[in-house]
Image (cartoon, rainbow, N blue to C red):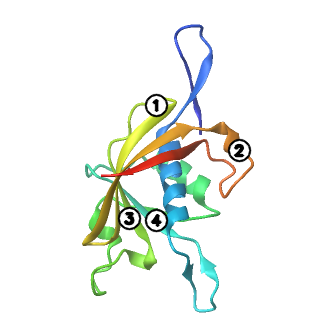
Amino acid sequence: MAVAACDGDDGTAVDVVSSADAITAIVAWQAGEQEPVLDENGEPQLPVIFVVADDGTTIDVGIQAAVAEATAEWATVRFADDASDAFDPDLEGEPVRNDGALLLLGPIPEPEPRIEMDVALYTAVDDTEGFTVQITSDTSTTGTGPDPARQASVTSVSQL
C-alpha cells in the first residue's frame, strides 16, 4: 500500500513508505536471508517470521492485515505483542518457534520516500544481531520478484 504525499513545492505526488510497506520490505529482506526449512518430505516450507514492536506496543491490526496479505505467498508472518511468545522454551537454547526468525522492530518513522529503522534479528533467545535498514519506496517492483505487490524495498543494511 503505497502512500502518496505532496512534496509542497509544486503539488506533485511522491511515493512514500507506509508502515505496512516498511514491515513488508523488512520481512522480504529477512525471508531472503533465511536458510530454507524442509518438511519431512524434503519440500521447502515458507519461512516463518515473527514481528514484534520493540516498545511493547501492539502493531495496528490494519497494518498486520496488510502485511499478512502482502506476504501470504512467500512467508508466514506472525505478529506478537511480546518477544517471548516467539521462543520455544521446551527446546535447548530456546530457538524461535518453527525454525523461524524474530524481528524486533524499532519505531517506524513518519512516511517519507526513504526511511531508516532499527531492527533486532533473533534466531534464539540469546542469539541476536542488530541492524539499521534503509527502506525506499519502490513501485517499480510491481509484477516482479517474490512479492509482486511490494511497494518498498530494503536498499541497505548496516550492522549495529
The answer to which of marks 2 and 4 sits earlier in the sequence is 4
* Residue 20 visible at all: no
Left or right of 12 in this view: 35: left
* Residue 37 visible at all: yes
The answer to which of marks 2 and 3 sits earlier in the sequence is 3
Tell me if residue 139 comes above or below residue 8 in the rendering.
below
Q: Given the image, on which type of amino acid does mark 2 rest?
A: Thr
What distance separates the C-alpha of mark 1 from that of mark 2? 20 Å
What distance separates the C-alpha of mark 2 from that of mark 4? 23 Å
Residue for badge 3: 102
Callout 1 secondary element = loop
Residue for badge 2: 142
What distance separates the C-alpha of mark 1 from that of mark 3? 24 Å
Callout 2 secondary element = loop
Give the x, y percent position of residue 27. Answer: 50, 56
Q: Given the image, on which type of amino acid does mark 3 rest?
A: Leu
The answer to which of marks 1 and 3 sits earlier in the sequence is 3
Give the x, y percent position of residue 84. Answer: 27, 68
Question: Which residue is drawn at the image coordinates 58% and 72% (left, top)?
Answer: 46
Q: Nearer the viewer, residue 45 or 82?
A: 45
Callout 3 secondary element = strand
Q: Residues within 10 Å of mark 2 (few under 14, many from 20)?
A: few
Q: Given the image, on which type of amino acid does mark 1 rest?
A: Pro
Q: Given the image, on which type of amino acid does mark 4 rest?
A: Ile
Residue for badge 4: 49
Residue for badge 1: 111
The answer to which of marks 1 and 2 sits earlier in the sequence is 1
